[in-house]
Amino acid sequence: MKRLKDNNVKAILFDLDGTLIDVDLKQFIPGYIKLLANSVSHIIPSRKFIPILLKASEAVTNNNGKVTNEEVFSNIFFPLEGHAKEEIEPIFIKFYEEDFKKIRKFTKKKPEARKVVKTAFDRGYEVVIATTPLLPLSAIQQRLDWAGVGDFPYNLITSYENSCATKPNLLYYQQIFKYLDLSAEECIMVGDEAKDMICAKLGSQTFLTPSPNTDLNSETPEPTYRGTLNDLIKLL
């Protein structure tokens, strides 16, 4: 089997949840929403907060690339029940600093994650954390720390502050390629879901690392490779 360098691959895009860290999304996502709602429950009832949060998140999913995901979210979300962004934002910042870590219990470190990321850097690849950019960088950085890979000098970590689209929109990947100044063919996407494998439609190679979240269907491009992170290490 040819090494990735032999196939002109210069950058590796890693998904985070289910790829570099094991996560029970059926508990993680509801747990996150409940915690965030509780952080503002003293001024906004959860029954009002959660529907607006979900509506704003859906708008981010449909972002067409003209403004950042953060701007799309804010335009839908604020003012929130008469409370301005300037009033709510400090509460959110405190939430990510103090409470977000409480849902770490729904994740589990993958011992091979650090090894594969370190190997990618050691072999001279550009390395991107291509996680769904629905959350702020502070939340993504914490999850990278939980995964044991938070201290690497990544070329890019996609977050809602710096992204203008999200998976499975191909524009999300095109923006990454533009940032790296590389073609799709010079990149490989490593992930566990159809929204990761869809990158192949632009010409990228893909590496599927199956997890309980894997959801491939008849419209999902066939992955270039399948295997564990240890199998990926052998390709690097």
Image: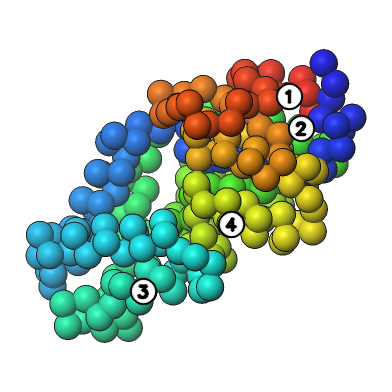
Quarter holding the C terminus is top right
Quarter occupied by residue 198: top right
Q: CA distance from mark 3 to mark 2?
A: 38 Å
x 51%, y 60%: residue: 165
x 22%, y 65%: residue: 52
Query: Which residue, given by chain and number where applicable, does mark 4 sit on?
Result: 171
Mark 4 secondary-structure assignment: helix
In the rendered image, the vertical position of residue 113 relative to residue 75, given as above or below: above
In the rendered image, the vertical position of residue 84 relative to residue 23, given as above or below: below
Mark 1 or 3, which is nearer the eye? 3
Q: CA distance from mark 4 to mark 1?
A: 28 Å
| Contact (Cβ within 8 Å) of mark 3 with mark 2 | no
Query: Which residue, given by chain and number where applicable, does mark 3 sit on?
Result: 74
| Contact (Cβ within 8 Å) of mark 3 with mark 4 | no
User: In front here: 213 or 109?
Assistant: 213
Q: Residues within 10 Å of mark 1 (few under 14, many from 20)?
A: some
Query: Which residue, given by chain and number where applicable, does mark 1 sit on?
Result: 233
Q: Looking at the image, is mark 3 or mark 4 earlier in the sequence? A: 3
Q: Looking at the image, is mark 2 or mark 4 earlier in the sequence? A: 2
Q: Residue furthest top?
A: 1
Quarter holding the N terminus is top right
Mark 4 or 1, which is nearer the eye? 4
Q: Looking at the image, is mark 3 or mark 2 earlier in the sequence? A: 3
| Contact (Cβ within 8 Å) of mark 4 with mark 1 | no
Q: Looking at the image, is mark 1 or mark 3 earlier in the sequence? A: 3
Query: Which residue, given by chain and number where applicable, does mark 2 sit on?
Result: 119
Q: Looking at the image, is mark 4 or mark 1 earlier in the sequence? A: 4
User: In front here: 38 or 128?
Assistant: 128
| Contact (Cβ within 8 Å) of mark 2 with mark 4 | no
